[in-house]
Amino acid sequence: MKYLCLECSAGPASAAVLEDGKVLSSTFCNIKLTHSQTLMPMVESVLRQSLTDLSEIAGIAVSAGPGSFTGIRIGISAVKGLAAAGNIPCAAVSTLSAMVPCFSSQNCIVCCVMDARCNQVYNALFRVENGVITRLCDDRALMCNELAEEIKQFENDLPVIITGDGTNLFYNFVKTLSFVRPADECHRWQNAVGVGLCAQQIFNENQTLSAAELLPIYLRLPQAERELKKRQEERKL
């Protein structure tokens, strides 16, 4: 079965069509245009390149968060629109989980980080050993210095690879640790192929959602809502 996969949780955007774990077509761009400009043309491109009509798509997967509030909303909205008309099943994939499959051939600890601003990152840790991926913690938002302290526990374990759009930010906090390194540029960015590989299990186990049920996964409130809540609390004082 063929699956359409989308990723636009941060600056880059990507789309892919996968069939039984095989990539039929994929496209990626990181040119600072808004995802509302780039995403649907990319969807049209990967469908055309894979000789696939939308009616042949058995499911649609999307990185549902964490990440950019605007990017996540655009991705979710696009999937809802594509899936609703044909009643296509949807898979909501953790953005952080989707970064890990490209490291499946290595033995390492994958530290996935996304820039959450103010020296914070969205993070999850995964152990990859002999092709088996094991999640070590839930998706979370925490300060970079807190995560740096936690990373020290792996000094005598497997090497740690930092990946995600927050790599440059967070690596500054751990660059003195010899067992930690940033991912290569080609493996550093969130990608729709990873979304599709993670979604395979969701589709296989029939843990899908309808277009109406598909919702963003936020680890914290958007900045505007946080500021409003802060002002409301200050007024109570």
Image (spheres, grey):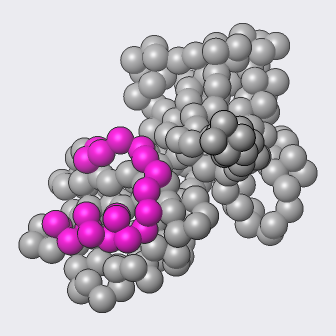
The residue range painted magenta reads 135-154
**Residue at (46%, 17%) from the top-left corner?**
207
Which quarter shows the N terminus?
Answer: top right
Judge whether 205 appears above or below 103 on screen: above
Q: Position of residue 47 (x, y in %)?
A: 76, 39
- Residue 111 part of the magenta-drawn span: no
- Residue 146 part of the magenta-drawn span: yes
Seen from the viewer's position, the closer of residues 202 and 174 is 174
Q: Position of residue 18 (x, y in %)?
A: 57, 39
| Residue 52, image quadrant | top right
Seen from the viewer's position, the closer of residues 36 and 24 is 36
Judge whether 91 appears above or below 221 on screen: above
**Residue at (58%, 67%) from the top-left corner?**
118
28 left or right of 189?
right
Name the outermost residue toward the right: 37
Q: Position of residue 42 (x, y in %)?
A: 80, 48
| Residue 61, image quadrant | top right
Which quarter shows the C terminus?
Answer: top right
87 left or right of 100?
right
Name the outermost residue toward the front: 237
Name the outermost residue toward the left: 156
* Residue 23 at least partly seen: no
Seen from the viewer's position, the closer of residues 27 and 215 is 215
* Residue 146 at least partly seen: yes
How many numbered circles does the render carry?
0
157 left or right of 218?
left
15 left or right of 48?
left
**Residue at (71%, 40%) from the top-left corner?**
235
Q: Position of residue 90 (x, y in %)?
A: 61, 22
**Residue at (80%, 68%) from the top-left corner?**
31
